[in-house]
Image: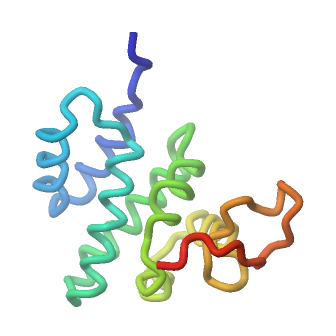
Amino acid sequence: MRPPIDDSVIAIICAEIPEFNDYYLDLLDIYDEDLTPEIVLMELADFVANLVVSGGREETLERCCAAVEHLAAGTARGPELVAACFLNELPHGSRAAIQPYLGRLTDRLAESVYGGDGLPDLEGPARGRPRGGTSGHGTS
């Protein structure tokens, strides 16, 4: 039997970012019952990166970052999901552009994911690697 999916993450994204709903419906068509919050957050990272590149509406970018902050602060797996599936998936060029819109918790998560050099710190300081070290991973 498949483990239960945390639909609260998906519900928050769809409720707070109406512009993302068409993307969500496409994901639902593709993944059906196998759609997970991880997949939705990775797609949201791509959506945000496209907003940055295309010069999309600032209000939409603000809502995306507010929804991500809501997830990070308001769901049990929020910080883990936001770090691994949203922040880690953002292309390098989008990171600086969204930084002013990040909430307090998301900003701290970004610092732990990217380290001091703007690259994802995939192993993290808890695994003995110094913060800000490069591993060659995540250079988008």
Q: Is residue 107 left or right of residue 124?
A: left
Q: Is residue 27 left or right of residue 76?
A: left
Question: How many labels, in total?
Answer: 0
x then y, percent, for residue 25: 12, 46
At horizontal 63% and vertical 64% (from top left) the residue drawn is: 109
At horizontal 20% and vertical 84% (from top left) the residue drawn is: 56
Q: Nearer the viewer, residue 29 or 139?
A: 139
Q: Quadrant of residue 28?
A: top left
x then y, percent, for residue 121: 68, 68
At horizontal 53% and vertical 78% (from top left) the residue drawn is: 139
Q: Nearer the viewer, residue 7 or 34?
A: 34
At horizontal 24% and vertical 49% (from top left) the residue drawn is: 15
x then y, percent, for residue 35: 28, 36
Residue that extends furthest to the front in the rendered view of this protein: 136
Q: Nearer the viewer, residue 10 or 35?
A: 35
Q: Quadrant of the N terminus?
A: top left
Q: Quadrant of residue 61?
A: bottom left
Q: Quadrant of residue 70?
A: bottom left
Q: Is residue 23 left or right of residue 39?
A: left
